[in-house]
């Protein structure tokens, strides 16, 4: 079928697949370096405890068949190796069928991780990586030109990501309709970046322009993805510019980056397409059957997107093939942070010496300037932001965090920037206090060197010690 392939998108496919492989590599690296403290056998939310109560049909994963920390590490590092091979172009050296299977390996491995990841993996960009990664496997390799149907489905994902996010903003917080949300967002977002302080202090009229431009980019521009060239490429390019602006303004894991990668697939990049044989019949049949399945599965995400009760970041099938997206339907006006402290005193008193734990990404010491981590994802830091919103968000894991801090657990301390206690002298008590944070003004920054000013609000967790540990007299 002559219409089946689009030779003009040869270079677009190459750039898209290599960039996606890079994001897979980051995702598996995050899993390999953080899982022991979060999900391991002695983690805060152990995978064996989860698989004992969650059926395989609802959460298909290799770890239902077997779990050990060593096996999880092998899967994560194998994912890194395969992703690196795809980044280097290993799929282009294989026959078409083998190339597809190679692309399905990181998808299957990451699906196994996400489906047992519980709270730590309850983010929209996890499902987005899986949805895009599954579809990317059927884009083919150098043995065939990119299939038009798969390119269309990738645009369909990009449309749902942007349009769904735009709709949830209009239906959510009134500040989006009043164009005032950016008066607060850069200060209260989950994990500010090194430039977030400066974005916050941009003139308020410019913030209004930013919000209005966001509405246009998310509600109007996505429709143009389905128009003829060069309009569709211009729409994709505008989305890329918008996402790069968001990359500069905060740390949103790989959400912005995978949106950029999706937009790359919609660009018709100038290149001379090589001459290749026609697509084999079996490949055409597989791609068309896949398209029919994904269009069928799109029913519930579309129904959710047009519903007045739209929910965000929801998966409608256990394989995460078609999902719904959207973020920041509401924006916090005030930033709260949970500050975790420990003491070596046998009996905590008002005058006890409490030492503060420093996290890598979340605000703590007011003089500590935020760093850029995205697309790397600091899972504990992100969940600490939710914990500050409400203790209910941390009910299933915060007790485990405190217990491991009291034990000076090595894997847990690796998730932090700095522990105030030496390895052989863990704290006897740990507590948590809630503070209100705000960005300093230009004048305060010059005078104090601090980018934050914080005020104590209340006790979040009273002094806690390990059960069964006797106090010294």
Image: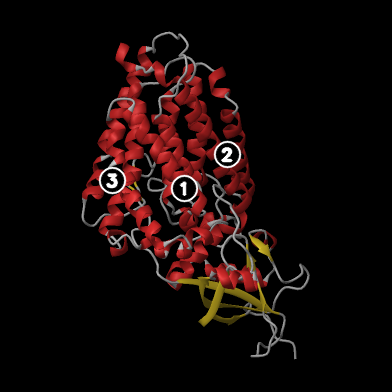
Query: Which residue sits at x=44%, y=47%?
Result: 125
Q: Earlier in the sequence, mark 1 or mark 3?
A: 3
Query: Which residue sits at x=38%, y=53%?
Result: 210
Disc 1 + disc 3, Cβ < 8 Å: no
* For residue 242, side relative to residue 363 (left or right): left
* 297 lies above or below 143: below
Task: Tell me how far mark 2 sits from mark 1, CA to CA.
Answer: 23 Å
Spot occupied by residue 238 in the image (x, y as percentages of width and height): 39, 39
| Residue topped by disc 3 | 219
| Residue topped by disc 2 | 25
How packed mark 1 is, by other alpha carbons closer than 10 Å (few <14, some 14-19, many 20 or more), is: few
Task: Tell me how far mark 3 sits from mark 2, CA to CA.
Answer: 31 Å
Q: 400 or 140, which lies in front?
A: 140
Task: Tell me how far mark 1 sits from mark 3, CA to CA.
Answer: 18 Å
Determine whether the residue tagged by mark 2 lies in a helix, strand or loop: helix
Between circles 3 and 2, the one closer to the viewer is 3
Spot occupied by residue 444 in the image (x, y as percentages of width and height): 58, 73
Q: Find residue 337 and name its label.
A: none
Determine whether the residue tagged by mark 1 lies in a helix, strand or loop: helix
Q: Find residue 245 and name its label.
A: 1
Q: How many numbered discs sit on the rendered protein?
A: 3
How packed mark 3 is, by other alpha carbons closer than 10 Å (few <14, some 14-19, many 20 or more), is: some
Q: 152 or 460, which lies in front?
A: 152
Quadrant occupied by the C terminus: bottom right
């Amino acid at each position: 079928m002559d219409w089946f392939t689009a030779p003009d998108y040869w270079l677009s496919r190459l750039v898209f697949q290599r960039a996606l492989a890079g994001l897979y590599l980051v995702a598996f690296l995050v899993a390999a370096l953080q899982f022991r403290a979060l999900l391991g056998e002695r983690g805060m939310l152990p995978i064996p405890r989860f698989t004992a109560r969650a059926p395989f049909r609802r959460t298909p994963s290799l770890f239902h068949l077997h779990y050990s920390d060593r096996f999880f590490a092998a899967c994560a590092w194998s994912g890194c190796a395969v992703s690196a091979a795809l980044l280097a172009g290993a799929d282009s050296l294989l026959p078409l069928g083998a190339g597809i299977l190679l692309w399905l390996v990181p998808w299957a491995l990451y699906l196994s991780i996400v489906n047992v990841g519980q709270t730590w993996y309850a983010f929209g960009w996890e499902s987005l990586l899986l949805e895009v990664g599954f579809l990317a496997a059927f884009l083919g390799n150098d043995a065939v030109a990119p299939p038009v149907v798969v390119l269309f489905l990738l645009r369909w994902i990009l449309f749902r990501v942007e349009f769904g996010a735009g709709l949830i903003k209009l239906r959510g917080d009134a500040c989006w309709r009043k164009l005032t949300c950016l008066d607060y967002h850069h200060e209260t977002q989950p994990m500010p970046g090194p430039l977030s302080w400066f974005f916050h202090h941009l003139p308020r009229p410019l913030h209004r322009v930013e919000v209005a431009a966001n509405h246009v980019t998310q509600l109007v521009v996505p429709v143009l993805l389905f128009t003829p060239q060069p309009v569709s490429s211009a729409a994709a390019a505008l989305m890329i510019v918008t996402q790069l602006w968001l990359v500069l303004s905060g740390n949103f894991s790989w959400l912005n980056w995978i949106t950029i990668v999706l937009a790359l697939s919609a660009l018709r990049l100038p290149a001379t397409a090589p001459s290749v044989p026609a697509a084999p019949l079996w490949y055409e049949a597989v791609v068309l059957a896949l398209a029919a399945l994904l269009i069928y599965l799109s029913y519930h995400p579309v129904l959710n997107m047009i519903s007045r009760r739209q929910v965000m970041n929801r998966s409608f099938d256990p394989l995460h093939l078609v999902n719904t997206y959207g973020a920041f339907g509401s924006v916090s006006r005030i930033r709260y942070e949970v500050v975790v402290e420990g003491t070596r005193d046998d009996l905590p008193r008002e005058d006890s010496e409490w030492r503060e734990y420093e996290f890598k990404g979340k605000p703590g010491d007011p003089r500590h300037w935020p760093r850029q981590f995205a697309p790397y994802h600091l899972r504990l830091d992100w969940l600490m932001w939710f914990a500050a919103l409400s203790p209910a968000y941390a009910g299933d894991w915060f007790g485990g965090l405190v217990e491991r801090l009291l034990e000076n657990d090595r894997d847990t301390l690796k998730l932090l920037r700095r522990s105030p206690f030496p390895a052989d002298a863990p704290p006897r008590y740990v507590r948590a206090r809630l503070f209100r944070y705000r960005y300093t003004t230009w004048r305060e920054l010059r005078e104090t060197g601090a980018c934050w000013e914080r005020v104590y609000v209340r006790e979040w967790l009273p002094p806690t010690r390990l059960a069964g540990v006797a106090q010294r007299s």
